[in-house]
């Protein structure tokens, strides 16, 4: 069963806080991990994309993957009100040439950053 | 930045009617997808399409659904006889180009909200 679990929140933090968002999964075949941000009435917007275990940093965002624990995280430093959105984790087993193939999504965590 | 565009943004249809949702993927992408999101639930994969044929489909994608790439730019999802439970957001996505990069992630459109009455 290719299940991805994600706490839906809601999560409410003050501006400037460090935010930690997490997902767990059960399928050890997953190798590619993504975080998408979804604003209200918009589509998922790719935020971070990582392969296998390790860390990846992009500005205020850091994605971590621990394949041994089947656990992925997204950290947002110095959070801003504009970060208020729903954050979706997604993953894939890849191996379809130039594309990842179908993605398996978590339920999404609703984040509010208040000024 | 290139983007995936979807039309219409909102479609209201009577149960039993046919509906066609339209998408223009990113122009140099080769793989196309449809996902749906029922209110309050996860985004779910429906189908992937490559080289003018379905490459993968989920258990949701039954005989009521079909996809087509009628020309070089559009990608459509047709639901033949809509049911109340088809009410959802439908997202189109695209990925993969000829630049030799493997395992490229998908980029999504803003979706079509389908309401079945």
Image (spheres, coloured by chain):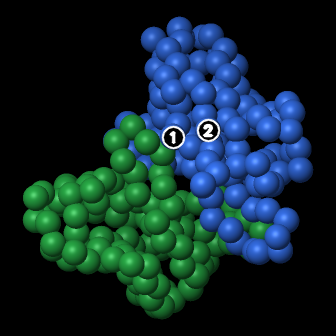
Chain colours: A green, B blue
Q: Secondary structure at mark 2?
A: strand
Mark 1, chain letter? B
Identity of the residue drawn at 81% across and 33% down? B68
Identity of the residue drawn at 48% across and 45% down? A43
- Residue B59 can be seen in this image: no
Number of residue marks:
2
Q: Is residue B36 placed above or below B15 in the rendered structure? A: below
Q: Nearer the viewer, residue A3 or B9?
A: B9
Q: Secondary structure at mark 1?
A: loop
Question: On the image, which quarter does residue B17 sit in?
Answer: top right
Mark 2, chain letter? B
Q: For the residue carrying disc 2, how many other residues have a C-alpha within 10 Å: few (<14), some (14-19), or many (20+)?
A: many
**Whole-percent x, y for residue B23 in the image:** 67, 35
Mark carried by residue B7: none
Q: Are marks 2 and 1 on the same chain?
A: yes
**Whole-percent x, y for residue B46 in the image:** 63, 44
**Whole-percent x, y for residue B43 in the image:** 48, 48
> Which residue is under mark 1?
B110
Q: Nearer the viewer, residue A90 or B109?
A: B109
Locate residue A104 relative to residue B41 in the image: left or right.
right
Q: For the residue carrying disc 1, how many other residues have a C-alpha within 10 Å: few (<14), some (14-19), or many (20+)?
A: many
């Amino acid at each position: 069963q290719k299940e991805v679990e994600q706490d839906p929140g809601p999560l409410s933090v003050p501006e400037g806080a460090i935010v930690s968002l997490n997902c767990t999964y059960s399928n050890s075949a997953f190798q590619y991990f993504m975080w998408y941000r979804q604003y209200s009435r918009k589509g998922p917007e790719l935020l971070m994309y990582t392969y296998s275990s390790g860390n990846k940093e992009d500005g205020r965002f850091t994605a971590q993957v621990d394949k041994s624990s089947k656990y992925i995280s997204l950290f947002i430093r110095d959070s801003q009100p504009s970060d208020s959105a729903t954050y979706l984790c997604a993953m894939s087993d890849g191996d379809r040439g130039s594309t990842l193939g179908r993605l398996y999504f978590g339920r999404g965590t609703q984040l509010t950053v208040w000024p | 930045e290139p983007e995936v565009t979807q039309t219409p943004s909102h479609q209201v249809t009577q149960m039993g009617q046919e509906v066609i949702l339209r998408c223009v993927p990113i122009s140099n992408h080769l793989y196309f997808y449809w996902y749906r999101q029922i209110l309050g639930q996860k985004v779910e994969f429906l189908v992937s399409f490559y080289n003018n044929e379905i490459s993968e489909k989920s258990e949701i994608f039954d005989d009521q659904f079909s996809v087509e790439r009628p020309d070089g730019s559009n990608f459509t999802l047709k639901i033949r006889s809509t049911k109340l439970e088809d009410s959802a957001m439908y997202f189109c996505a695209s990925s993969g180009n000829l630049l030799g990069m493997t395992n490229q992630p998908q980029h999504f459109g803003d979706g079509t909200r389908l309401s079945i009455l």
